[in-house]
Amino acid sequence: MEGLFVQTENQRAFVETVGRFVEEEVVPRAAALDAEPDPAKCYSWDIVEKAHALGVRTMTLDEKWGGLGADPLTTAMVIEELSKGDLGVAITLGQTLKLAQIFQSGLNEEQKARVLPGFSKDPRGMLAIGITEPDNASNYLVPYPAPFRTVAVKTNGGWIVNGMKHFISNANRASHFLFFAQTEKGKPMTAGSTCFLVERDRAGFTIGRVHDKMGERLANNAEMIFQDCYIPDENVVGKVGDGFNELAKFMPWSNAYGGATILGVAVALHKKAVDWAKVRVQGGKLLIEHDGIRAQLAEMRMLIDASRAYIHRACWLAVHPEHGWDKTLGALPKVMASQATWKIATWCLEIHGGHGYMKEFGVEKLVRDAAAYLHSDGVNRTLFLKAANFMFQK
Ligand SMILES: Cc1cc2nc3c(=O)[nH]c(=O)nc-3n(C[C@H](O)[C@H](O)[C@H](O)COP(=O)(O)OP(=O)(O)OC[C@H]3O[C@@H](n4cnc5c(N)ncnc54)[C@H](O)[C@@H]3O)c2cc1C
């Protein structure tokens, strides 16, 4: 029973390689990219291409498709490592790593043969998923009987799609997307929506605004716009009208990846707090010699370790469900990690005093980043409701 809470040699070696990549290629550039006023300019293809050269971009693909066949636990470790350097880079690559796994399990053989070889070879191959719409967000997490506003109408050999998705990670960078549209009028999205595959260059599909975000700026989020876009039947993923079940089936470990994505920010904040406490003298001694501060640094450590254990447990049980998977593990690890990170962000700021508020110390960027996962991958309150529904069978 390999893997649970114990790093194997291979995992350790790969995570260390990613750690060096982060130190050499991400950390030196993150602050300058983050400070670009134009959100599109915060993105670095160079970082993506270097991650590709290391095998990180495609690591979750099976070897047959040119990947390393990494399991969810190893992937979560790598995502956390990326996020120690920059949250946006972790999201850019993490979203692609997650979707590559979904493409492998959700696409049919013809679709995989059409998409995966090109994606695998392209150093800029990125993936995205469009579910959220201006009027439908938490509605798909705690299912509410509304339809998606993005509509696909049947025509000869395919579908005509109209509508839009927003806030979509990687939307303006991806080569391939999954998205959900309403295919049955008069039914809620849970019963009448379908999952489709769409390629970047398809006529009638364009990218709208790139959102100007408060944090995680090295990742881009944008709108997906469909205007009489023809999608052939060959691009239906799973069964027509069954999009919601596809969605639920795809991602038992997705929430844990969200947790790993934000946890690296907590580790970076904790390190900053410790480093500062070791050099700043007030009250006649180093901050770290004041008991209140030492105790707070230990509490931060506990929150990080407990969040990581929860994330790793969810990743491991998602592939070994017979040992005790329960559905709350698909909703709560991200909540715990993001709440812990937010608490650690405010404590790190406090330990830095006024210095933390000055941009030059780098705490300010981490605080903006720390806010991102209070709602990304589902607002925390919504995820508590989702977990409660699992627990109490609603
Ligand atoms: C950085 C970022 C990246 C994202 N990436 C993607 C992506 O790649 N793909 C994608 O599809 N989406 C993506 N999203 C969308 C994300 O999943 C949604 O933003 C999120 O689900 C929240 O939606 P909302 O902002 O519309 O909030 P709302 O759903 O409007 O919620 C607002 C508030 O109401 C509460 N609420 C909602 N419903 C209920 C209820 N039934 N009972 C009680 N309280 C309720 C919520 O908890 C929240 O506090 C991303 C968002 C961000 C910010």
Image (spheres, rainbow, N blue to C red):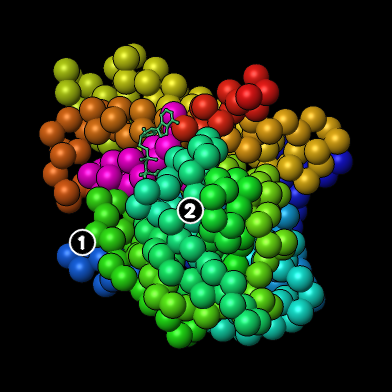
Q: Is the magenta stretch mostly helix, strand or loop?
A: helix
Left or right: 267 in relation to 322: left
Above or below, 260 against 333 in this view is below
Which residue is denoted by mark 2 in the rendering?
A: 148
Local secondary structure at mark 1:
loop
* Residue in view at x 37 percent, y 48 percent: 135
Left or right: 277 in relation to 235: left
Q: Could you say which is closer to the camera, residue 317 or residue 35? A: 317
Estimate the x, y position of residue 62 in percent, counting from the top left. 76, 69
Which quarter shows the N terminus?
top right
Above or below, 379 against 152 in this view is above
Which quarter shows the C terminus?
top right
Estimate the x, y position of residue 280 in percent, counting from the top left. 22, 32
Above or below, 67 against 251 in this view is below
Local secondary structure at mark 2:
loop
* Residue in view at x 68 percent, y 33 percent: 327
For marks 2 and 1, give the CA distance: 36 Å
* Residue in view at x 51 percent, y 27 percent: 384
Which residue is denoted by mark 1 in the rendering?
A: 35
Which is more foreground, mark 2 or mark 1? 2
Q: State the extent of the magenta-drawn residues as a range.
A: 363-381
Q: Can residue 154 be seen in this view?
A: yes
